[in-house]
Amino acid sequence: MLGRFEEASQIYRDIYAGRIKLQGEEHGKTLLAANNYANGLVYLRRHKECKSLLRKTMPVARRVLGESNDLTLRLNWTYGRALCVDTGATLDDIREAVTTLEDARRIARRVFGGTHPLTMGIESTLRNSQKFSQTLLRARETGGF
């Protein structure tokens, strides 16, 4: 809230690293710390670092917490956002974002319902990534990309 985003990101990183040391990578609090850190990285537009973190964290969350768990869905949502807001995103990145978000939306709707804030957030990000995907496809078809 004070605009000290880089400092906040470093704190999130330190908390995540500390959780790994204290509780291991499979602990729920470690996975939550990873999601908080990843969200900060998205905000700072450090997408490559964010995607790398989440690519190793998401499978752990699915295995330990299950695919229907709130935190697992949040990690997938953060990953989808990281993929689709990256200005250097390729069409494959956007397709991966859409697929990830479609899966998360399906599960969130089943588990939490359509009016739950998590479901609504995932759906909003999914709509944006689908629009971006269509824009990229049209640009490639017309030679503008």
Image (cartoon, rainbow, N blue to C red):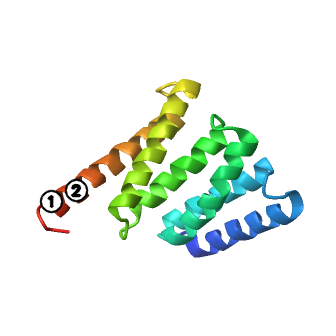
Q: How many marks?
A: 2
Q: CA distance from mark 2 to mark 1?
A: 6 Å
Q: Amino acid at mark 2?
A: Leu
- Quarter of the figure that contains the N terminus: bottom right
> Which residue appears farthest toward the right when viewing the image?
22
Q: Which mark is residue 75?
A: none
**Residue 84 location in percent, x, y?**
40, 57
Packing grade of label 1 (10 A; few <14, some 14-19, many >=20) is: few
User: Can residue 116 be seen in the rendering of this structure?
Assistant: no
Q: Identify the residue at image location x=43%, y=45%.
A: 99
Q: Identify the residue at image location x=47%, y=27%.
A: 115
**Callout 2–callout 1 Cβ contact below 8 Å:** yes
- Quarter of the figure that contains the C terminus: bottom left
Which sits in the foreground, 20 or 139? 139
Look at the picture and state if 100 lies above or below 92. Answer: above
**Residue 7 location in percent, x, y?**
63, 75
**Residue holding disc 2:** 137
Residue 34 placement: quadrant: bottom right
Q: Which mark is residue 141?
A: 1
Q: Amino acid at mark 1?
A: Glu
Q: Identify the residue at image location x=50%, y=35%.
A: 119
**Residue 20 location in percent, x, y?**
81, 63
Residue 18 placement: quadrant: bottom right
Look at the numbered disc 1 and give the secondary structure of its residue: helix
